[in-house]
Image (cartoon, grey):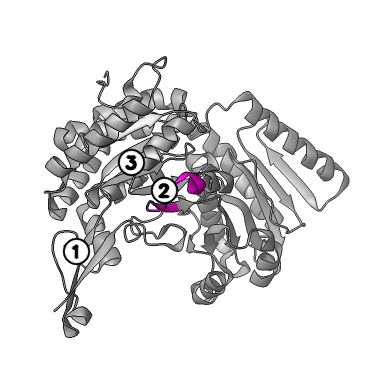
Amino acid sequence: MNLPNYFLADLPAEAELSPTMLAEACGTLKRNREQYLAPRTTDQIVKFLANVAEGWLQTDNPFRKLALAQGPGKTGFGRPTLARGLDQFFGQLTRENLRALLGQELGDAKRLDELIATPGEGKNSRAAIATGPELLVHIAAGNIPNPTFMSLVLGLLTRSAQFVKCGSGAAFLPRLFAHSLYDADHKLGACLEIAEWRGGSAALEDQLFAAADCVTATGSDETLAAIRAKLPVRTRLLAHGHRVSFGYVTGEALFGHRAKKIVTAAADDVVAWNQLGCLSPHVIYVQRGGEFAPEHFAQLLAEELERRELVEPRGEVATEVAAGIASRRGIYEVRAAHSPETQLWHCQHSTAWTVVCEADARFAVSCLYRFIYVKAVTDLENVLQNADAVRGKVSTVGLAAAEEEIQTITTKLARWGVTRVCPLGQMQDPPLTWRHDGRPALGDLVTWTDWEA
C-alpha cells in the first residue's frame, strides 16, 4: 500500500517546510473546518470514529497491515508489541465509550450541538453549550503513538481543525491514523494536517503558534516552558510534562496462584510499549510478609520477561540506548557481587530485559526498554517516603492488593498526589474516559457559553 500525498508529512524527506507553507496550511484547515466539520453532529462524529477504529482491529485492514509491516523498522517496536498496543487503543474507541466520555466531561453528549440544561441547571433556569477551538495544534511526543491518536480523536469530537507537529522521524503511526480518517471521509480528513520537523525551528513554530487557538503539548518540563514562552497571550496551552509511574504489590496479595498472576500482570506493564510511556512502571514495590518474598517475586518476573522475549521481542534499539543499559547493568553486577542486598537477572544474549532487586527502597528512574527495579518495602508509608523525590510527578500506580485494602490505599495515594490508580497489568491501557494527569481530557479543550433564562 502506497500512501498518497495528503499531508505535509507525506512530502519527500528532502522537502523543506517554510513559514509560508504552514500559514497556508492553517488557513486551509480553518476554511475546511467551517465547511466540512463544524456542521457535523456529535453523533455523526462518534459513529465515524467508531467505524474507523473497528477497521483498525481487522487483520486485513490496509493501514493496520502497513503499521505492522513497516512499524518495527520505523518505530523500534516489535510487531507483537505494536499489534497489542493498537488493539488496546482501538478496542476502546467504541460508540459506547465515546458517548460515556462526552457525558462524563460535558454532562450531556449533546453539549457540543445545542444548549442543554442538566437537571441541576434546569432548576436554576440555566443551560449551556460547549464549543471547541477553531484550530487545535498538537505538539506530539514521539515515544508512543496512542496519546497522539487520542489527541486527534478529542479534536474531532470538539469539531476543531487540527495540526499535529511530530518530532523528526516520529510521524509514521500518527500519519497512518490520519490517512485512515481521510480514507473513511475525505472531507473530515481535509480538516487535519500532520507534519514533522526537529524541535527548535523558531520560524515554523512561531507561525504555527500564531495561528492556533489552543495548543496541546507533551514533553519535558523544559520543552513545555519554551513553548509557553512563545505562545500569544490569547492562546490556551494544555501541557503534559514529565511523569513517572510505579507498581505496588501488598503482602496480602502475594499468596497461592494469585501471586503468579500478579507477576504476569507486572510483566504486561513492563513489556507494553517497551516501558516508554509515562504510565509505564520504573519500580515495582513489593511488601514483605507475603508468601512470596520480594526477591522471589523478582526472580519470577525475570523468568516471565525471558519467556515474553520469545513471543513478544523488544525489538532493536539504538546503539547508545543499548550502551546505556549495559552500563547500568554493570553497576548492579558489581553491587550484586559484593552484597546480598542486590540481585540481578538479565537477558544473556542482549539488553532485551533486566530485573534489579535491591533492599534500597529509594525510587530509581529506569533506563526503560524493559529495565525494571523491584524494591522491598514494609508498607505503603515506606513506599511514599522513598518516592518523595518524585512526589507531584507520579502519573499512575499499578496496584495489586487484597480487596479490603484497595480503598484505603487508593485514598492515601490520591492525597499524596497520584492521579491514577489501576490494577497492575493495566498501567499502559487506560480507559477512554481516563483523566490525563488528573484533568478532564475533553473538558479542558472547550469553552462554555451559559444561557440564563
Q: Name the amino acid, label 1.
A: Arg
Residue at 42% across / 30% down in the picture?
A: 79
| Kind of residue sitting beneath label 3 | Ala
For mark 1, what is the residue? 111
The Cα atoms of the two marked residues, 1 and 2, are separated by 28 Å
Do we see residue 181 in this rendering? no
Foreground residue, 367 or 165?
Answer: 165
Q: Is residue 411 visible?
A: yes
Q: Is residue 68 magenta?
A: no
Q: Residues within 10 Å of mark 3 (few under 14, many from 20)?
A: many
Q: Name the spot of residue 409 as percent of width and height, x first.
A: 55, 72
Left or right, residue 321 beside residue 336: left
- Of tags 3 and 1, which is closer to the observer? 3
Q: Residue at x 27, y 30 (%)?
A: 24
- In front here: 121 or 24? 24
Task: Please tell me which of labels 3 and 1 falls first in the chain.
Answer: 1
Task: Give the SS element for disc 2.
Answer: loop
Residue ID for mark 3: 211
Mark 2 neighbour class, 10 Å CA radius: few under 14, some 14 to 19, many 20 or more: some
Residue 411, image x and y in percent?
A: 52, 75
